[in-house]
Image (spheres, rainbow, N blue to C red):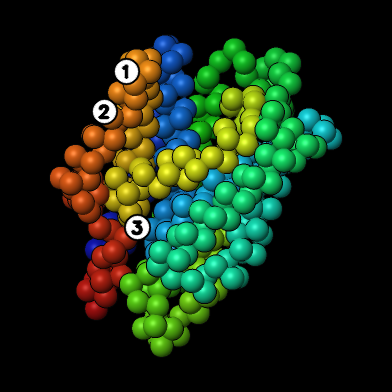
């Protein structure tokens, strides 16, 4: 007999499938290239924020240095393609694996830090990576690298004439990030992460391997973010250190989750659907004044929403707080 918790999980999956199906048909009716571009970016940042949320939302290890993994994914794909002719698909996989290994390597010393010390460490490490790439002549240094485009090709993942292939890949990436989070949320690791976030000492006393759980969250989060960075490099066909490793990318990964509801299943996607179009529209329509009006409008709206719903916009919906209450629901539903 199904418990209330199992029914809720199944309903979530059905809802996600329906939303993905609706999203898949939207570009067929929206022909405006600018709007298609905004949709691609919205899905991409939704996937990245969902990936960031695994480490920072569920495990409670707030990172403001995920731009490092984004840049590693982008540079790995572009360098392998331009220098050695390796297809971008292999570059995505390679960038993800490299990022996961680096995340665990950096986690070994950094996860011994707590609170704001850990946050500062992630920022410093990301900035060090940015400076290293700035001076890496083989990788184009500050000039960056242009990806040679020779026509539409799924093999080389290049589509200069259409945004639709990029849209569907971004949709697939967002779906994968959501499904990974959905699956992990009800796994042993998901319960470990939430326990570590709430009280590491109590979790350890109950048998949770705190350090290993943090390392696992970092690896999964970094892998998915690196795949997003690889996709972005192919999407824009040109990268330089600031365009893929700047501090603003770390913030853009965190803001949708914080706005939508950090540590929740739907929060990052909801935040991205609101935040990214808002970012692009304010930049397009009021950013040309040269006085930073777009940033004032954008920042003011974020502050207003955050003050009105400090727990995240997900609290407006009936499925709010699932990630926090799932274990309790399971206990109550189990006879």
Tag 2 near tag 1, CB within 8 Å: yes
Q: CA distance from mark 3 to mark 1?
A: 33 Å
Q: How dense is the environment of label 1, judged by Cα within 10 Å: few (below 14), some, or many (20 and up)?
A: some
Locate residue 136, reporting x and y percent: 75, 41
Residue 152 in sight: yes
In the rendered image, residue 48, in percent from the top left (x then y), is placed at 48, 44
Q: Residue furthest bottom?
A: 205
Position of the N terminus, as image quadrant, is bottom left
Quick check: can you spot residue 226?
A: no
- Quarter location, residue 3: bottom left
> Mark 2 or mark 3: which is in front?
2
Residue linked to disc 1: 286
Q: CA distance from mark 2 to mark 1?
A: 9 Å
Q: Which residue does the numbered mark 3 point to in the structure image?
A: 263
Q: Which residue in the structure is indicated by mark 2?
A: 297
Q: Quadrant of residue 9?
A: bottom left
Give the mark, 2 or 1, whose residue is nearer the N terminus.
1
Quarter of the view holding residue 279: top left
- Residue drawn 29% across the image and 45% down it: 259
Q: Position of residue 198 (x, y in %)?
A: 33, 72
Q: Nearer the viewer, residue 69 or 125?
A: 125
Q: Which sits earlier in the primary sequence, circle 3 or circle 1?
A: 3
Q: Residue 211: x percent and y percent?
A: 52, 75
The C terminus, quarter of image: bottom left
């Amino acid at each position: 007999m199904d418990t209330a918790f199992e029914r809720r999980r199944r309903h979530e999956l059905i809802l996600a499938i329906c939303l993905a199906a609706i999203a898949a048909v939207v570009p067929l009716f929206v022909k405006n290239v600018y709007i298609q571009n905004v949709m691609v970016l919205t899905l991409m940042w939704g996937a990245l924020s969902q990936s960031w949320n695994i480490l920072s939302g569920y495990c409670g290890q707030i990172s403001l240095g995920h731009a490092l993994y984004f840049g590693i994914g982008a540079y790995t794909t572009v360098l392998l393609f331009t220098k050695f002719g390796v297809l971008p698909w292999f570059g995505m996989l390679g960038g993800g694996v490299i990022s996961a290994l680096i995340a665990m390597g950096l986690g070994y010393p950094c996860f011994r830090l707590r609170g704001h010390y850990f946050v500062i460490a992630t920022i410093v490490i990301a900035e060090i990576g940015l400076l290293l790439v700035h001076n890496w002549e083989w990788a184009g240094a500050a000039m960056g690298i242009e990806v040679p485009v020779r026509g539409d090709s799924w093999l080389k993942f290049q589509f200069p004439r259409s945004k639709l292939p990029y849209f569907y890949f971004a949709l697939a990436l967002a779906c994968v990030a959501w499904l990974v989070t959905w699956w992990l949320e009800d796994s042993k690791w998901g319960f470990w992460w939430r326990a570590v976030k709430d009280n590491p000492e109590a979790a350890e006393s109950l048998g949770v391997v705190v350090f290993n759980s943090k390392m696992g969250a970092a690896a999964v989060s970094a892998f998915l973010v690196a795949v997003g960075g690889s996709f972005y490099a192919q999407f824009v066909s040109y990268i330089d250190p600031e365009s893929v490793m700047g501090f603003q990318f770390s913030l853009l990964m965190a803001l949708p989750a914080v706005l939508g509801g950090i540590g929740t299943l739907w929060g990052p996607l909801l935040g991205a659907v609101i935040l990214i179009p808002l970012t692009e529209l304010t930049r397009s329509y009021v950013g040309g004044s040269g006085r930073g009006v777009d940033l004032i409008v954008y920042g003011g709206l974020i502050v207003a929403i955050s003050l009105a719903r400090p727990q995240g916009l997900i609290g407006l919906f009936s499925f709010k707080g699932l990630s926090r209450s799932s274990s309790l629901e399971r206990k109550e539903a189990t006879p």
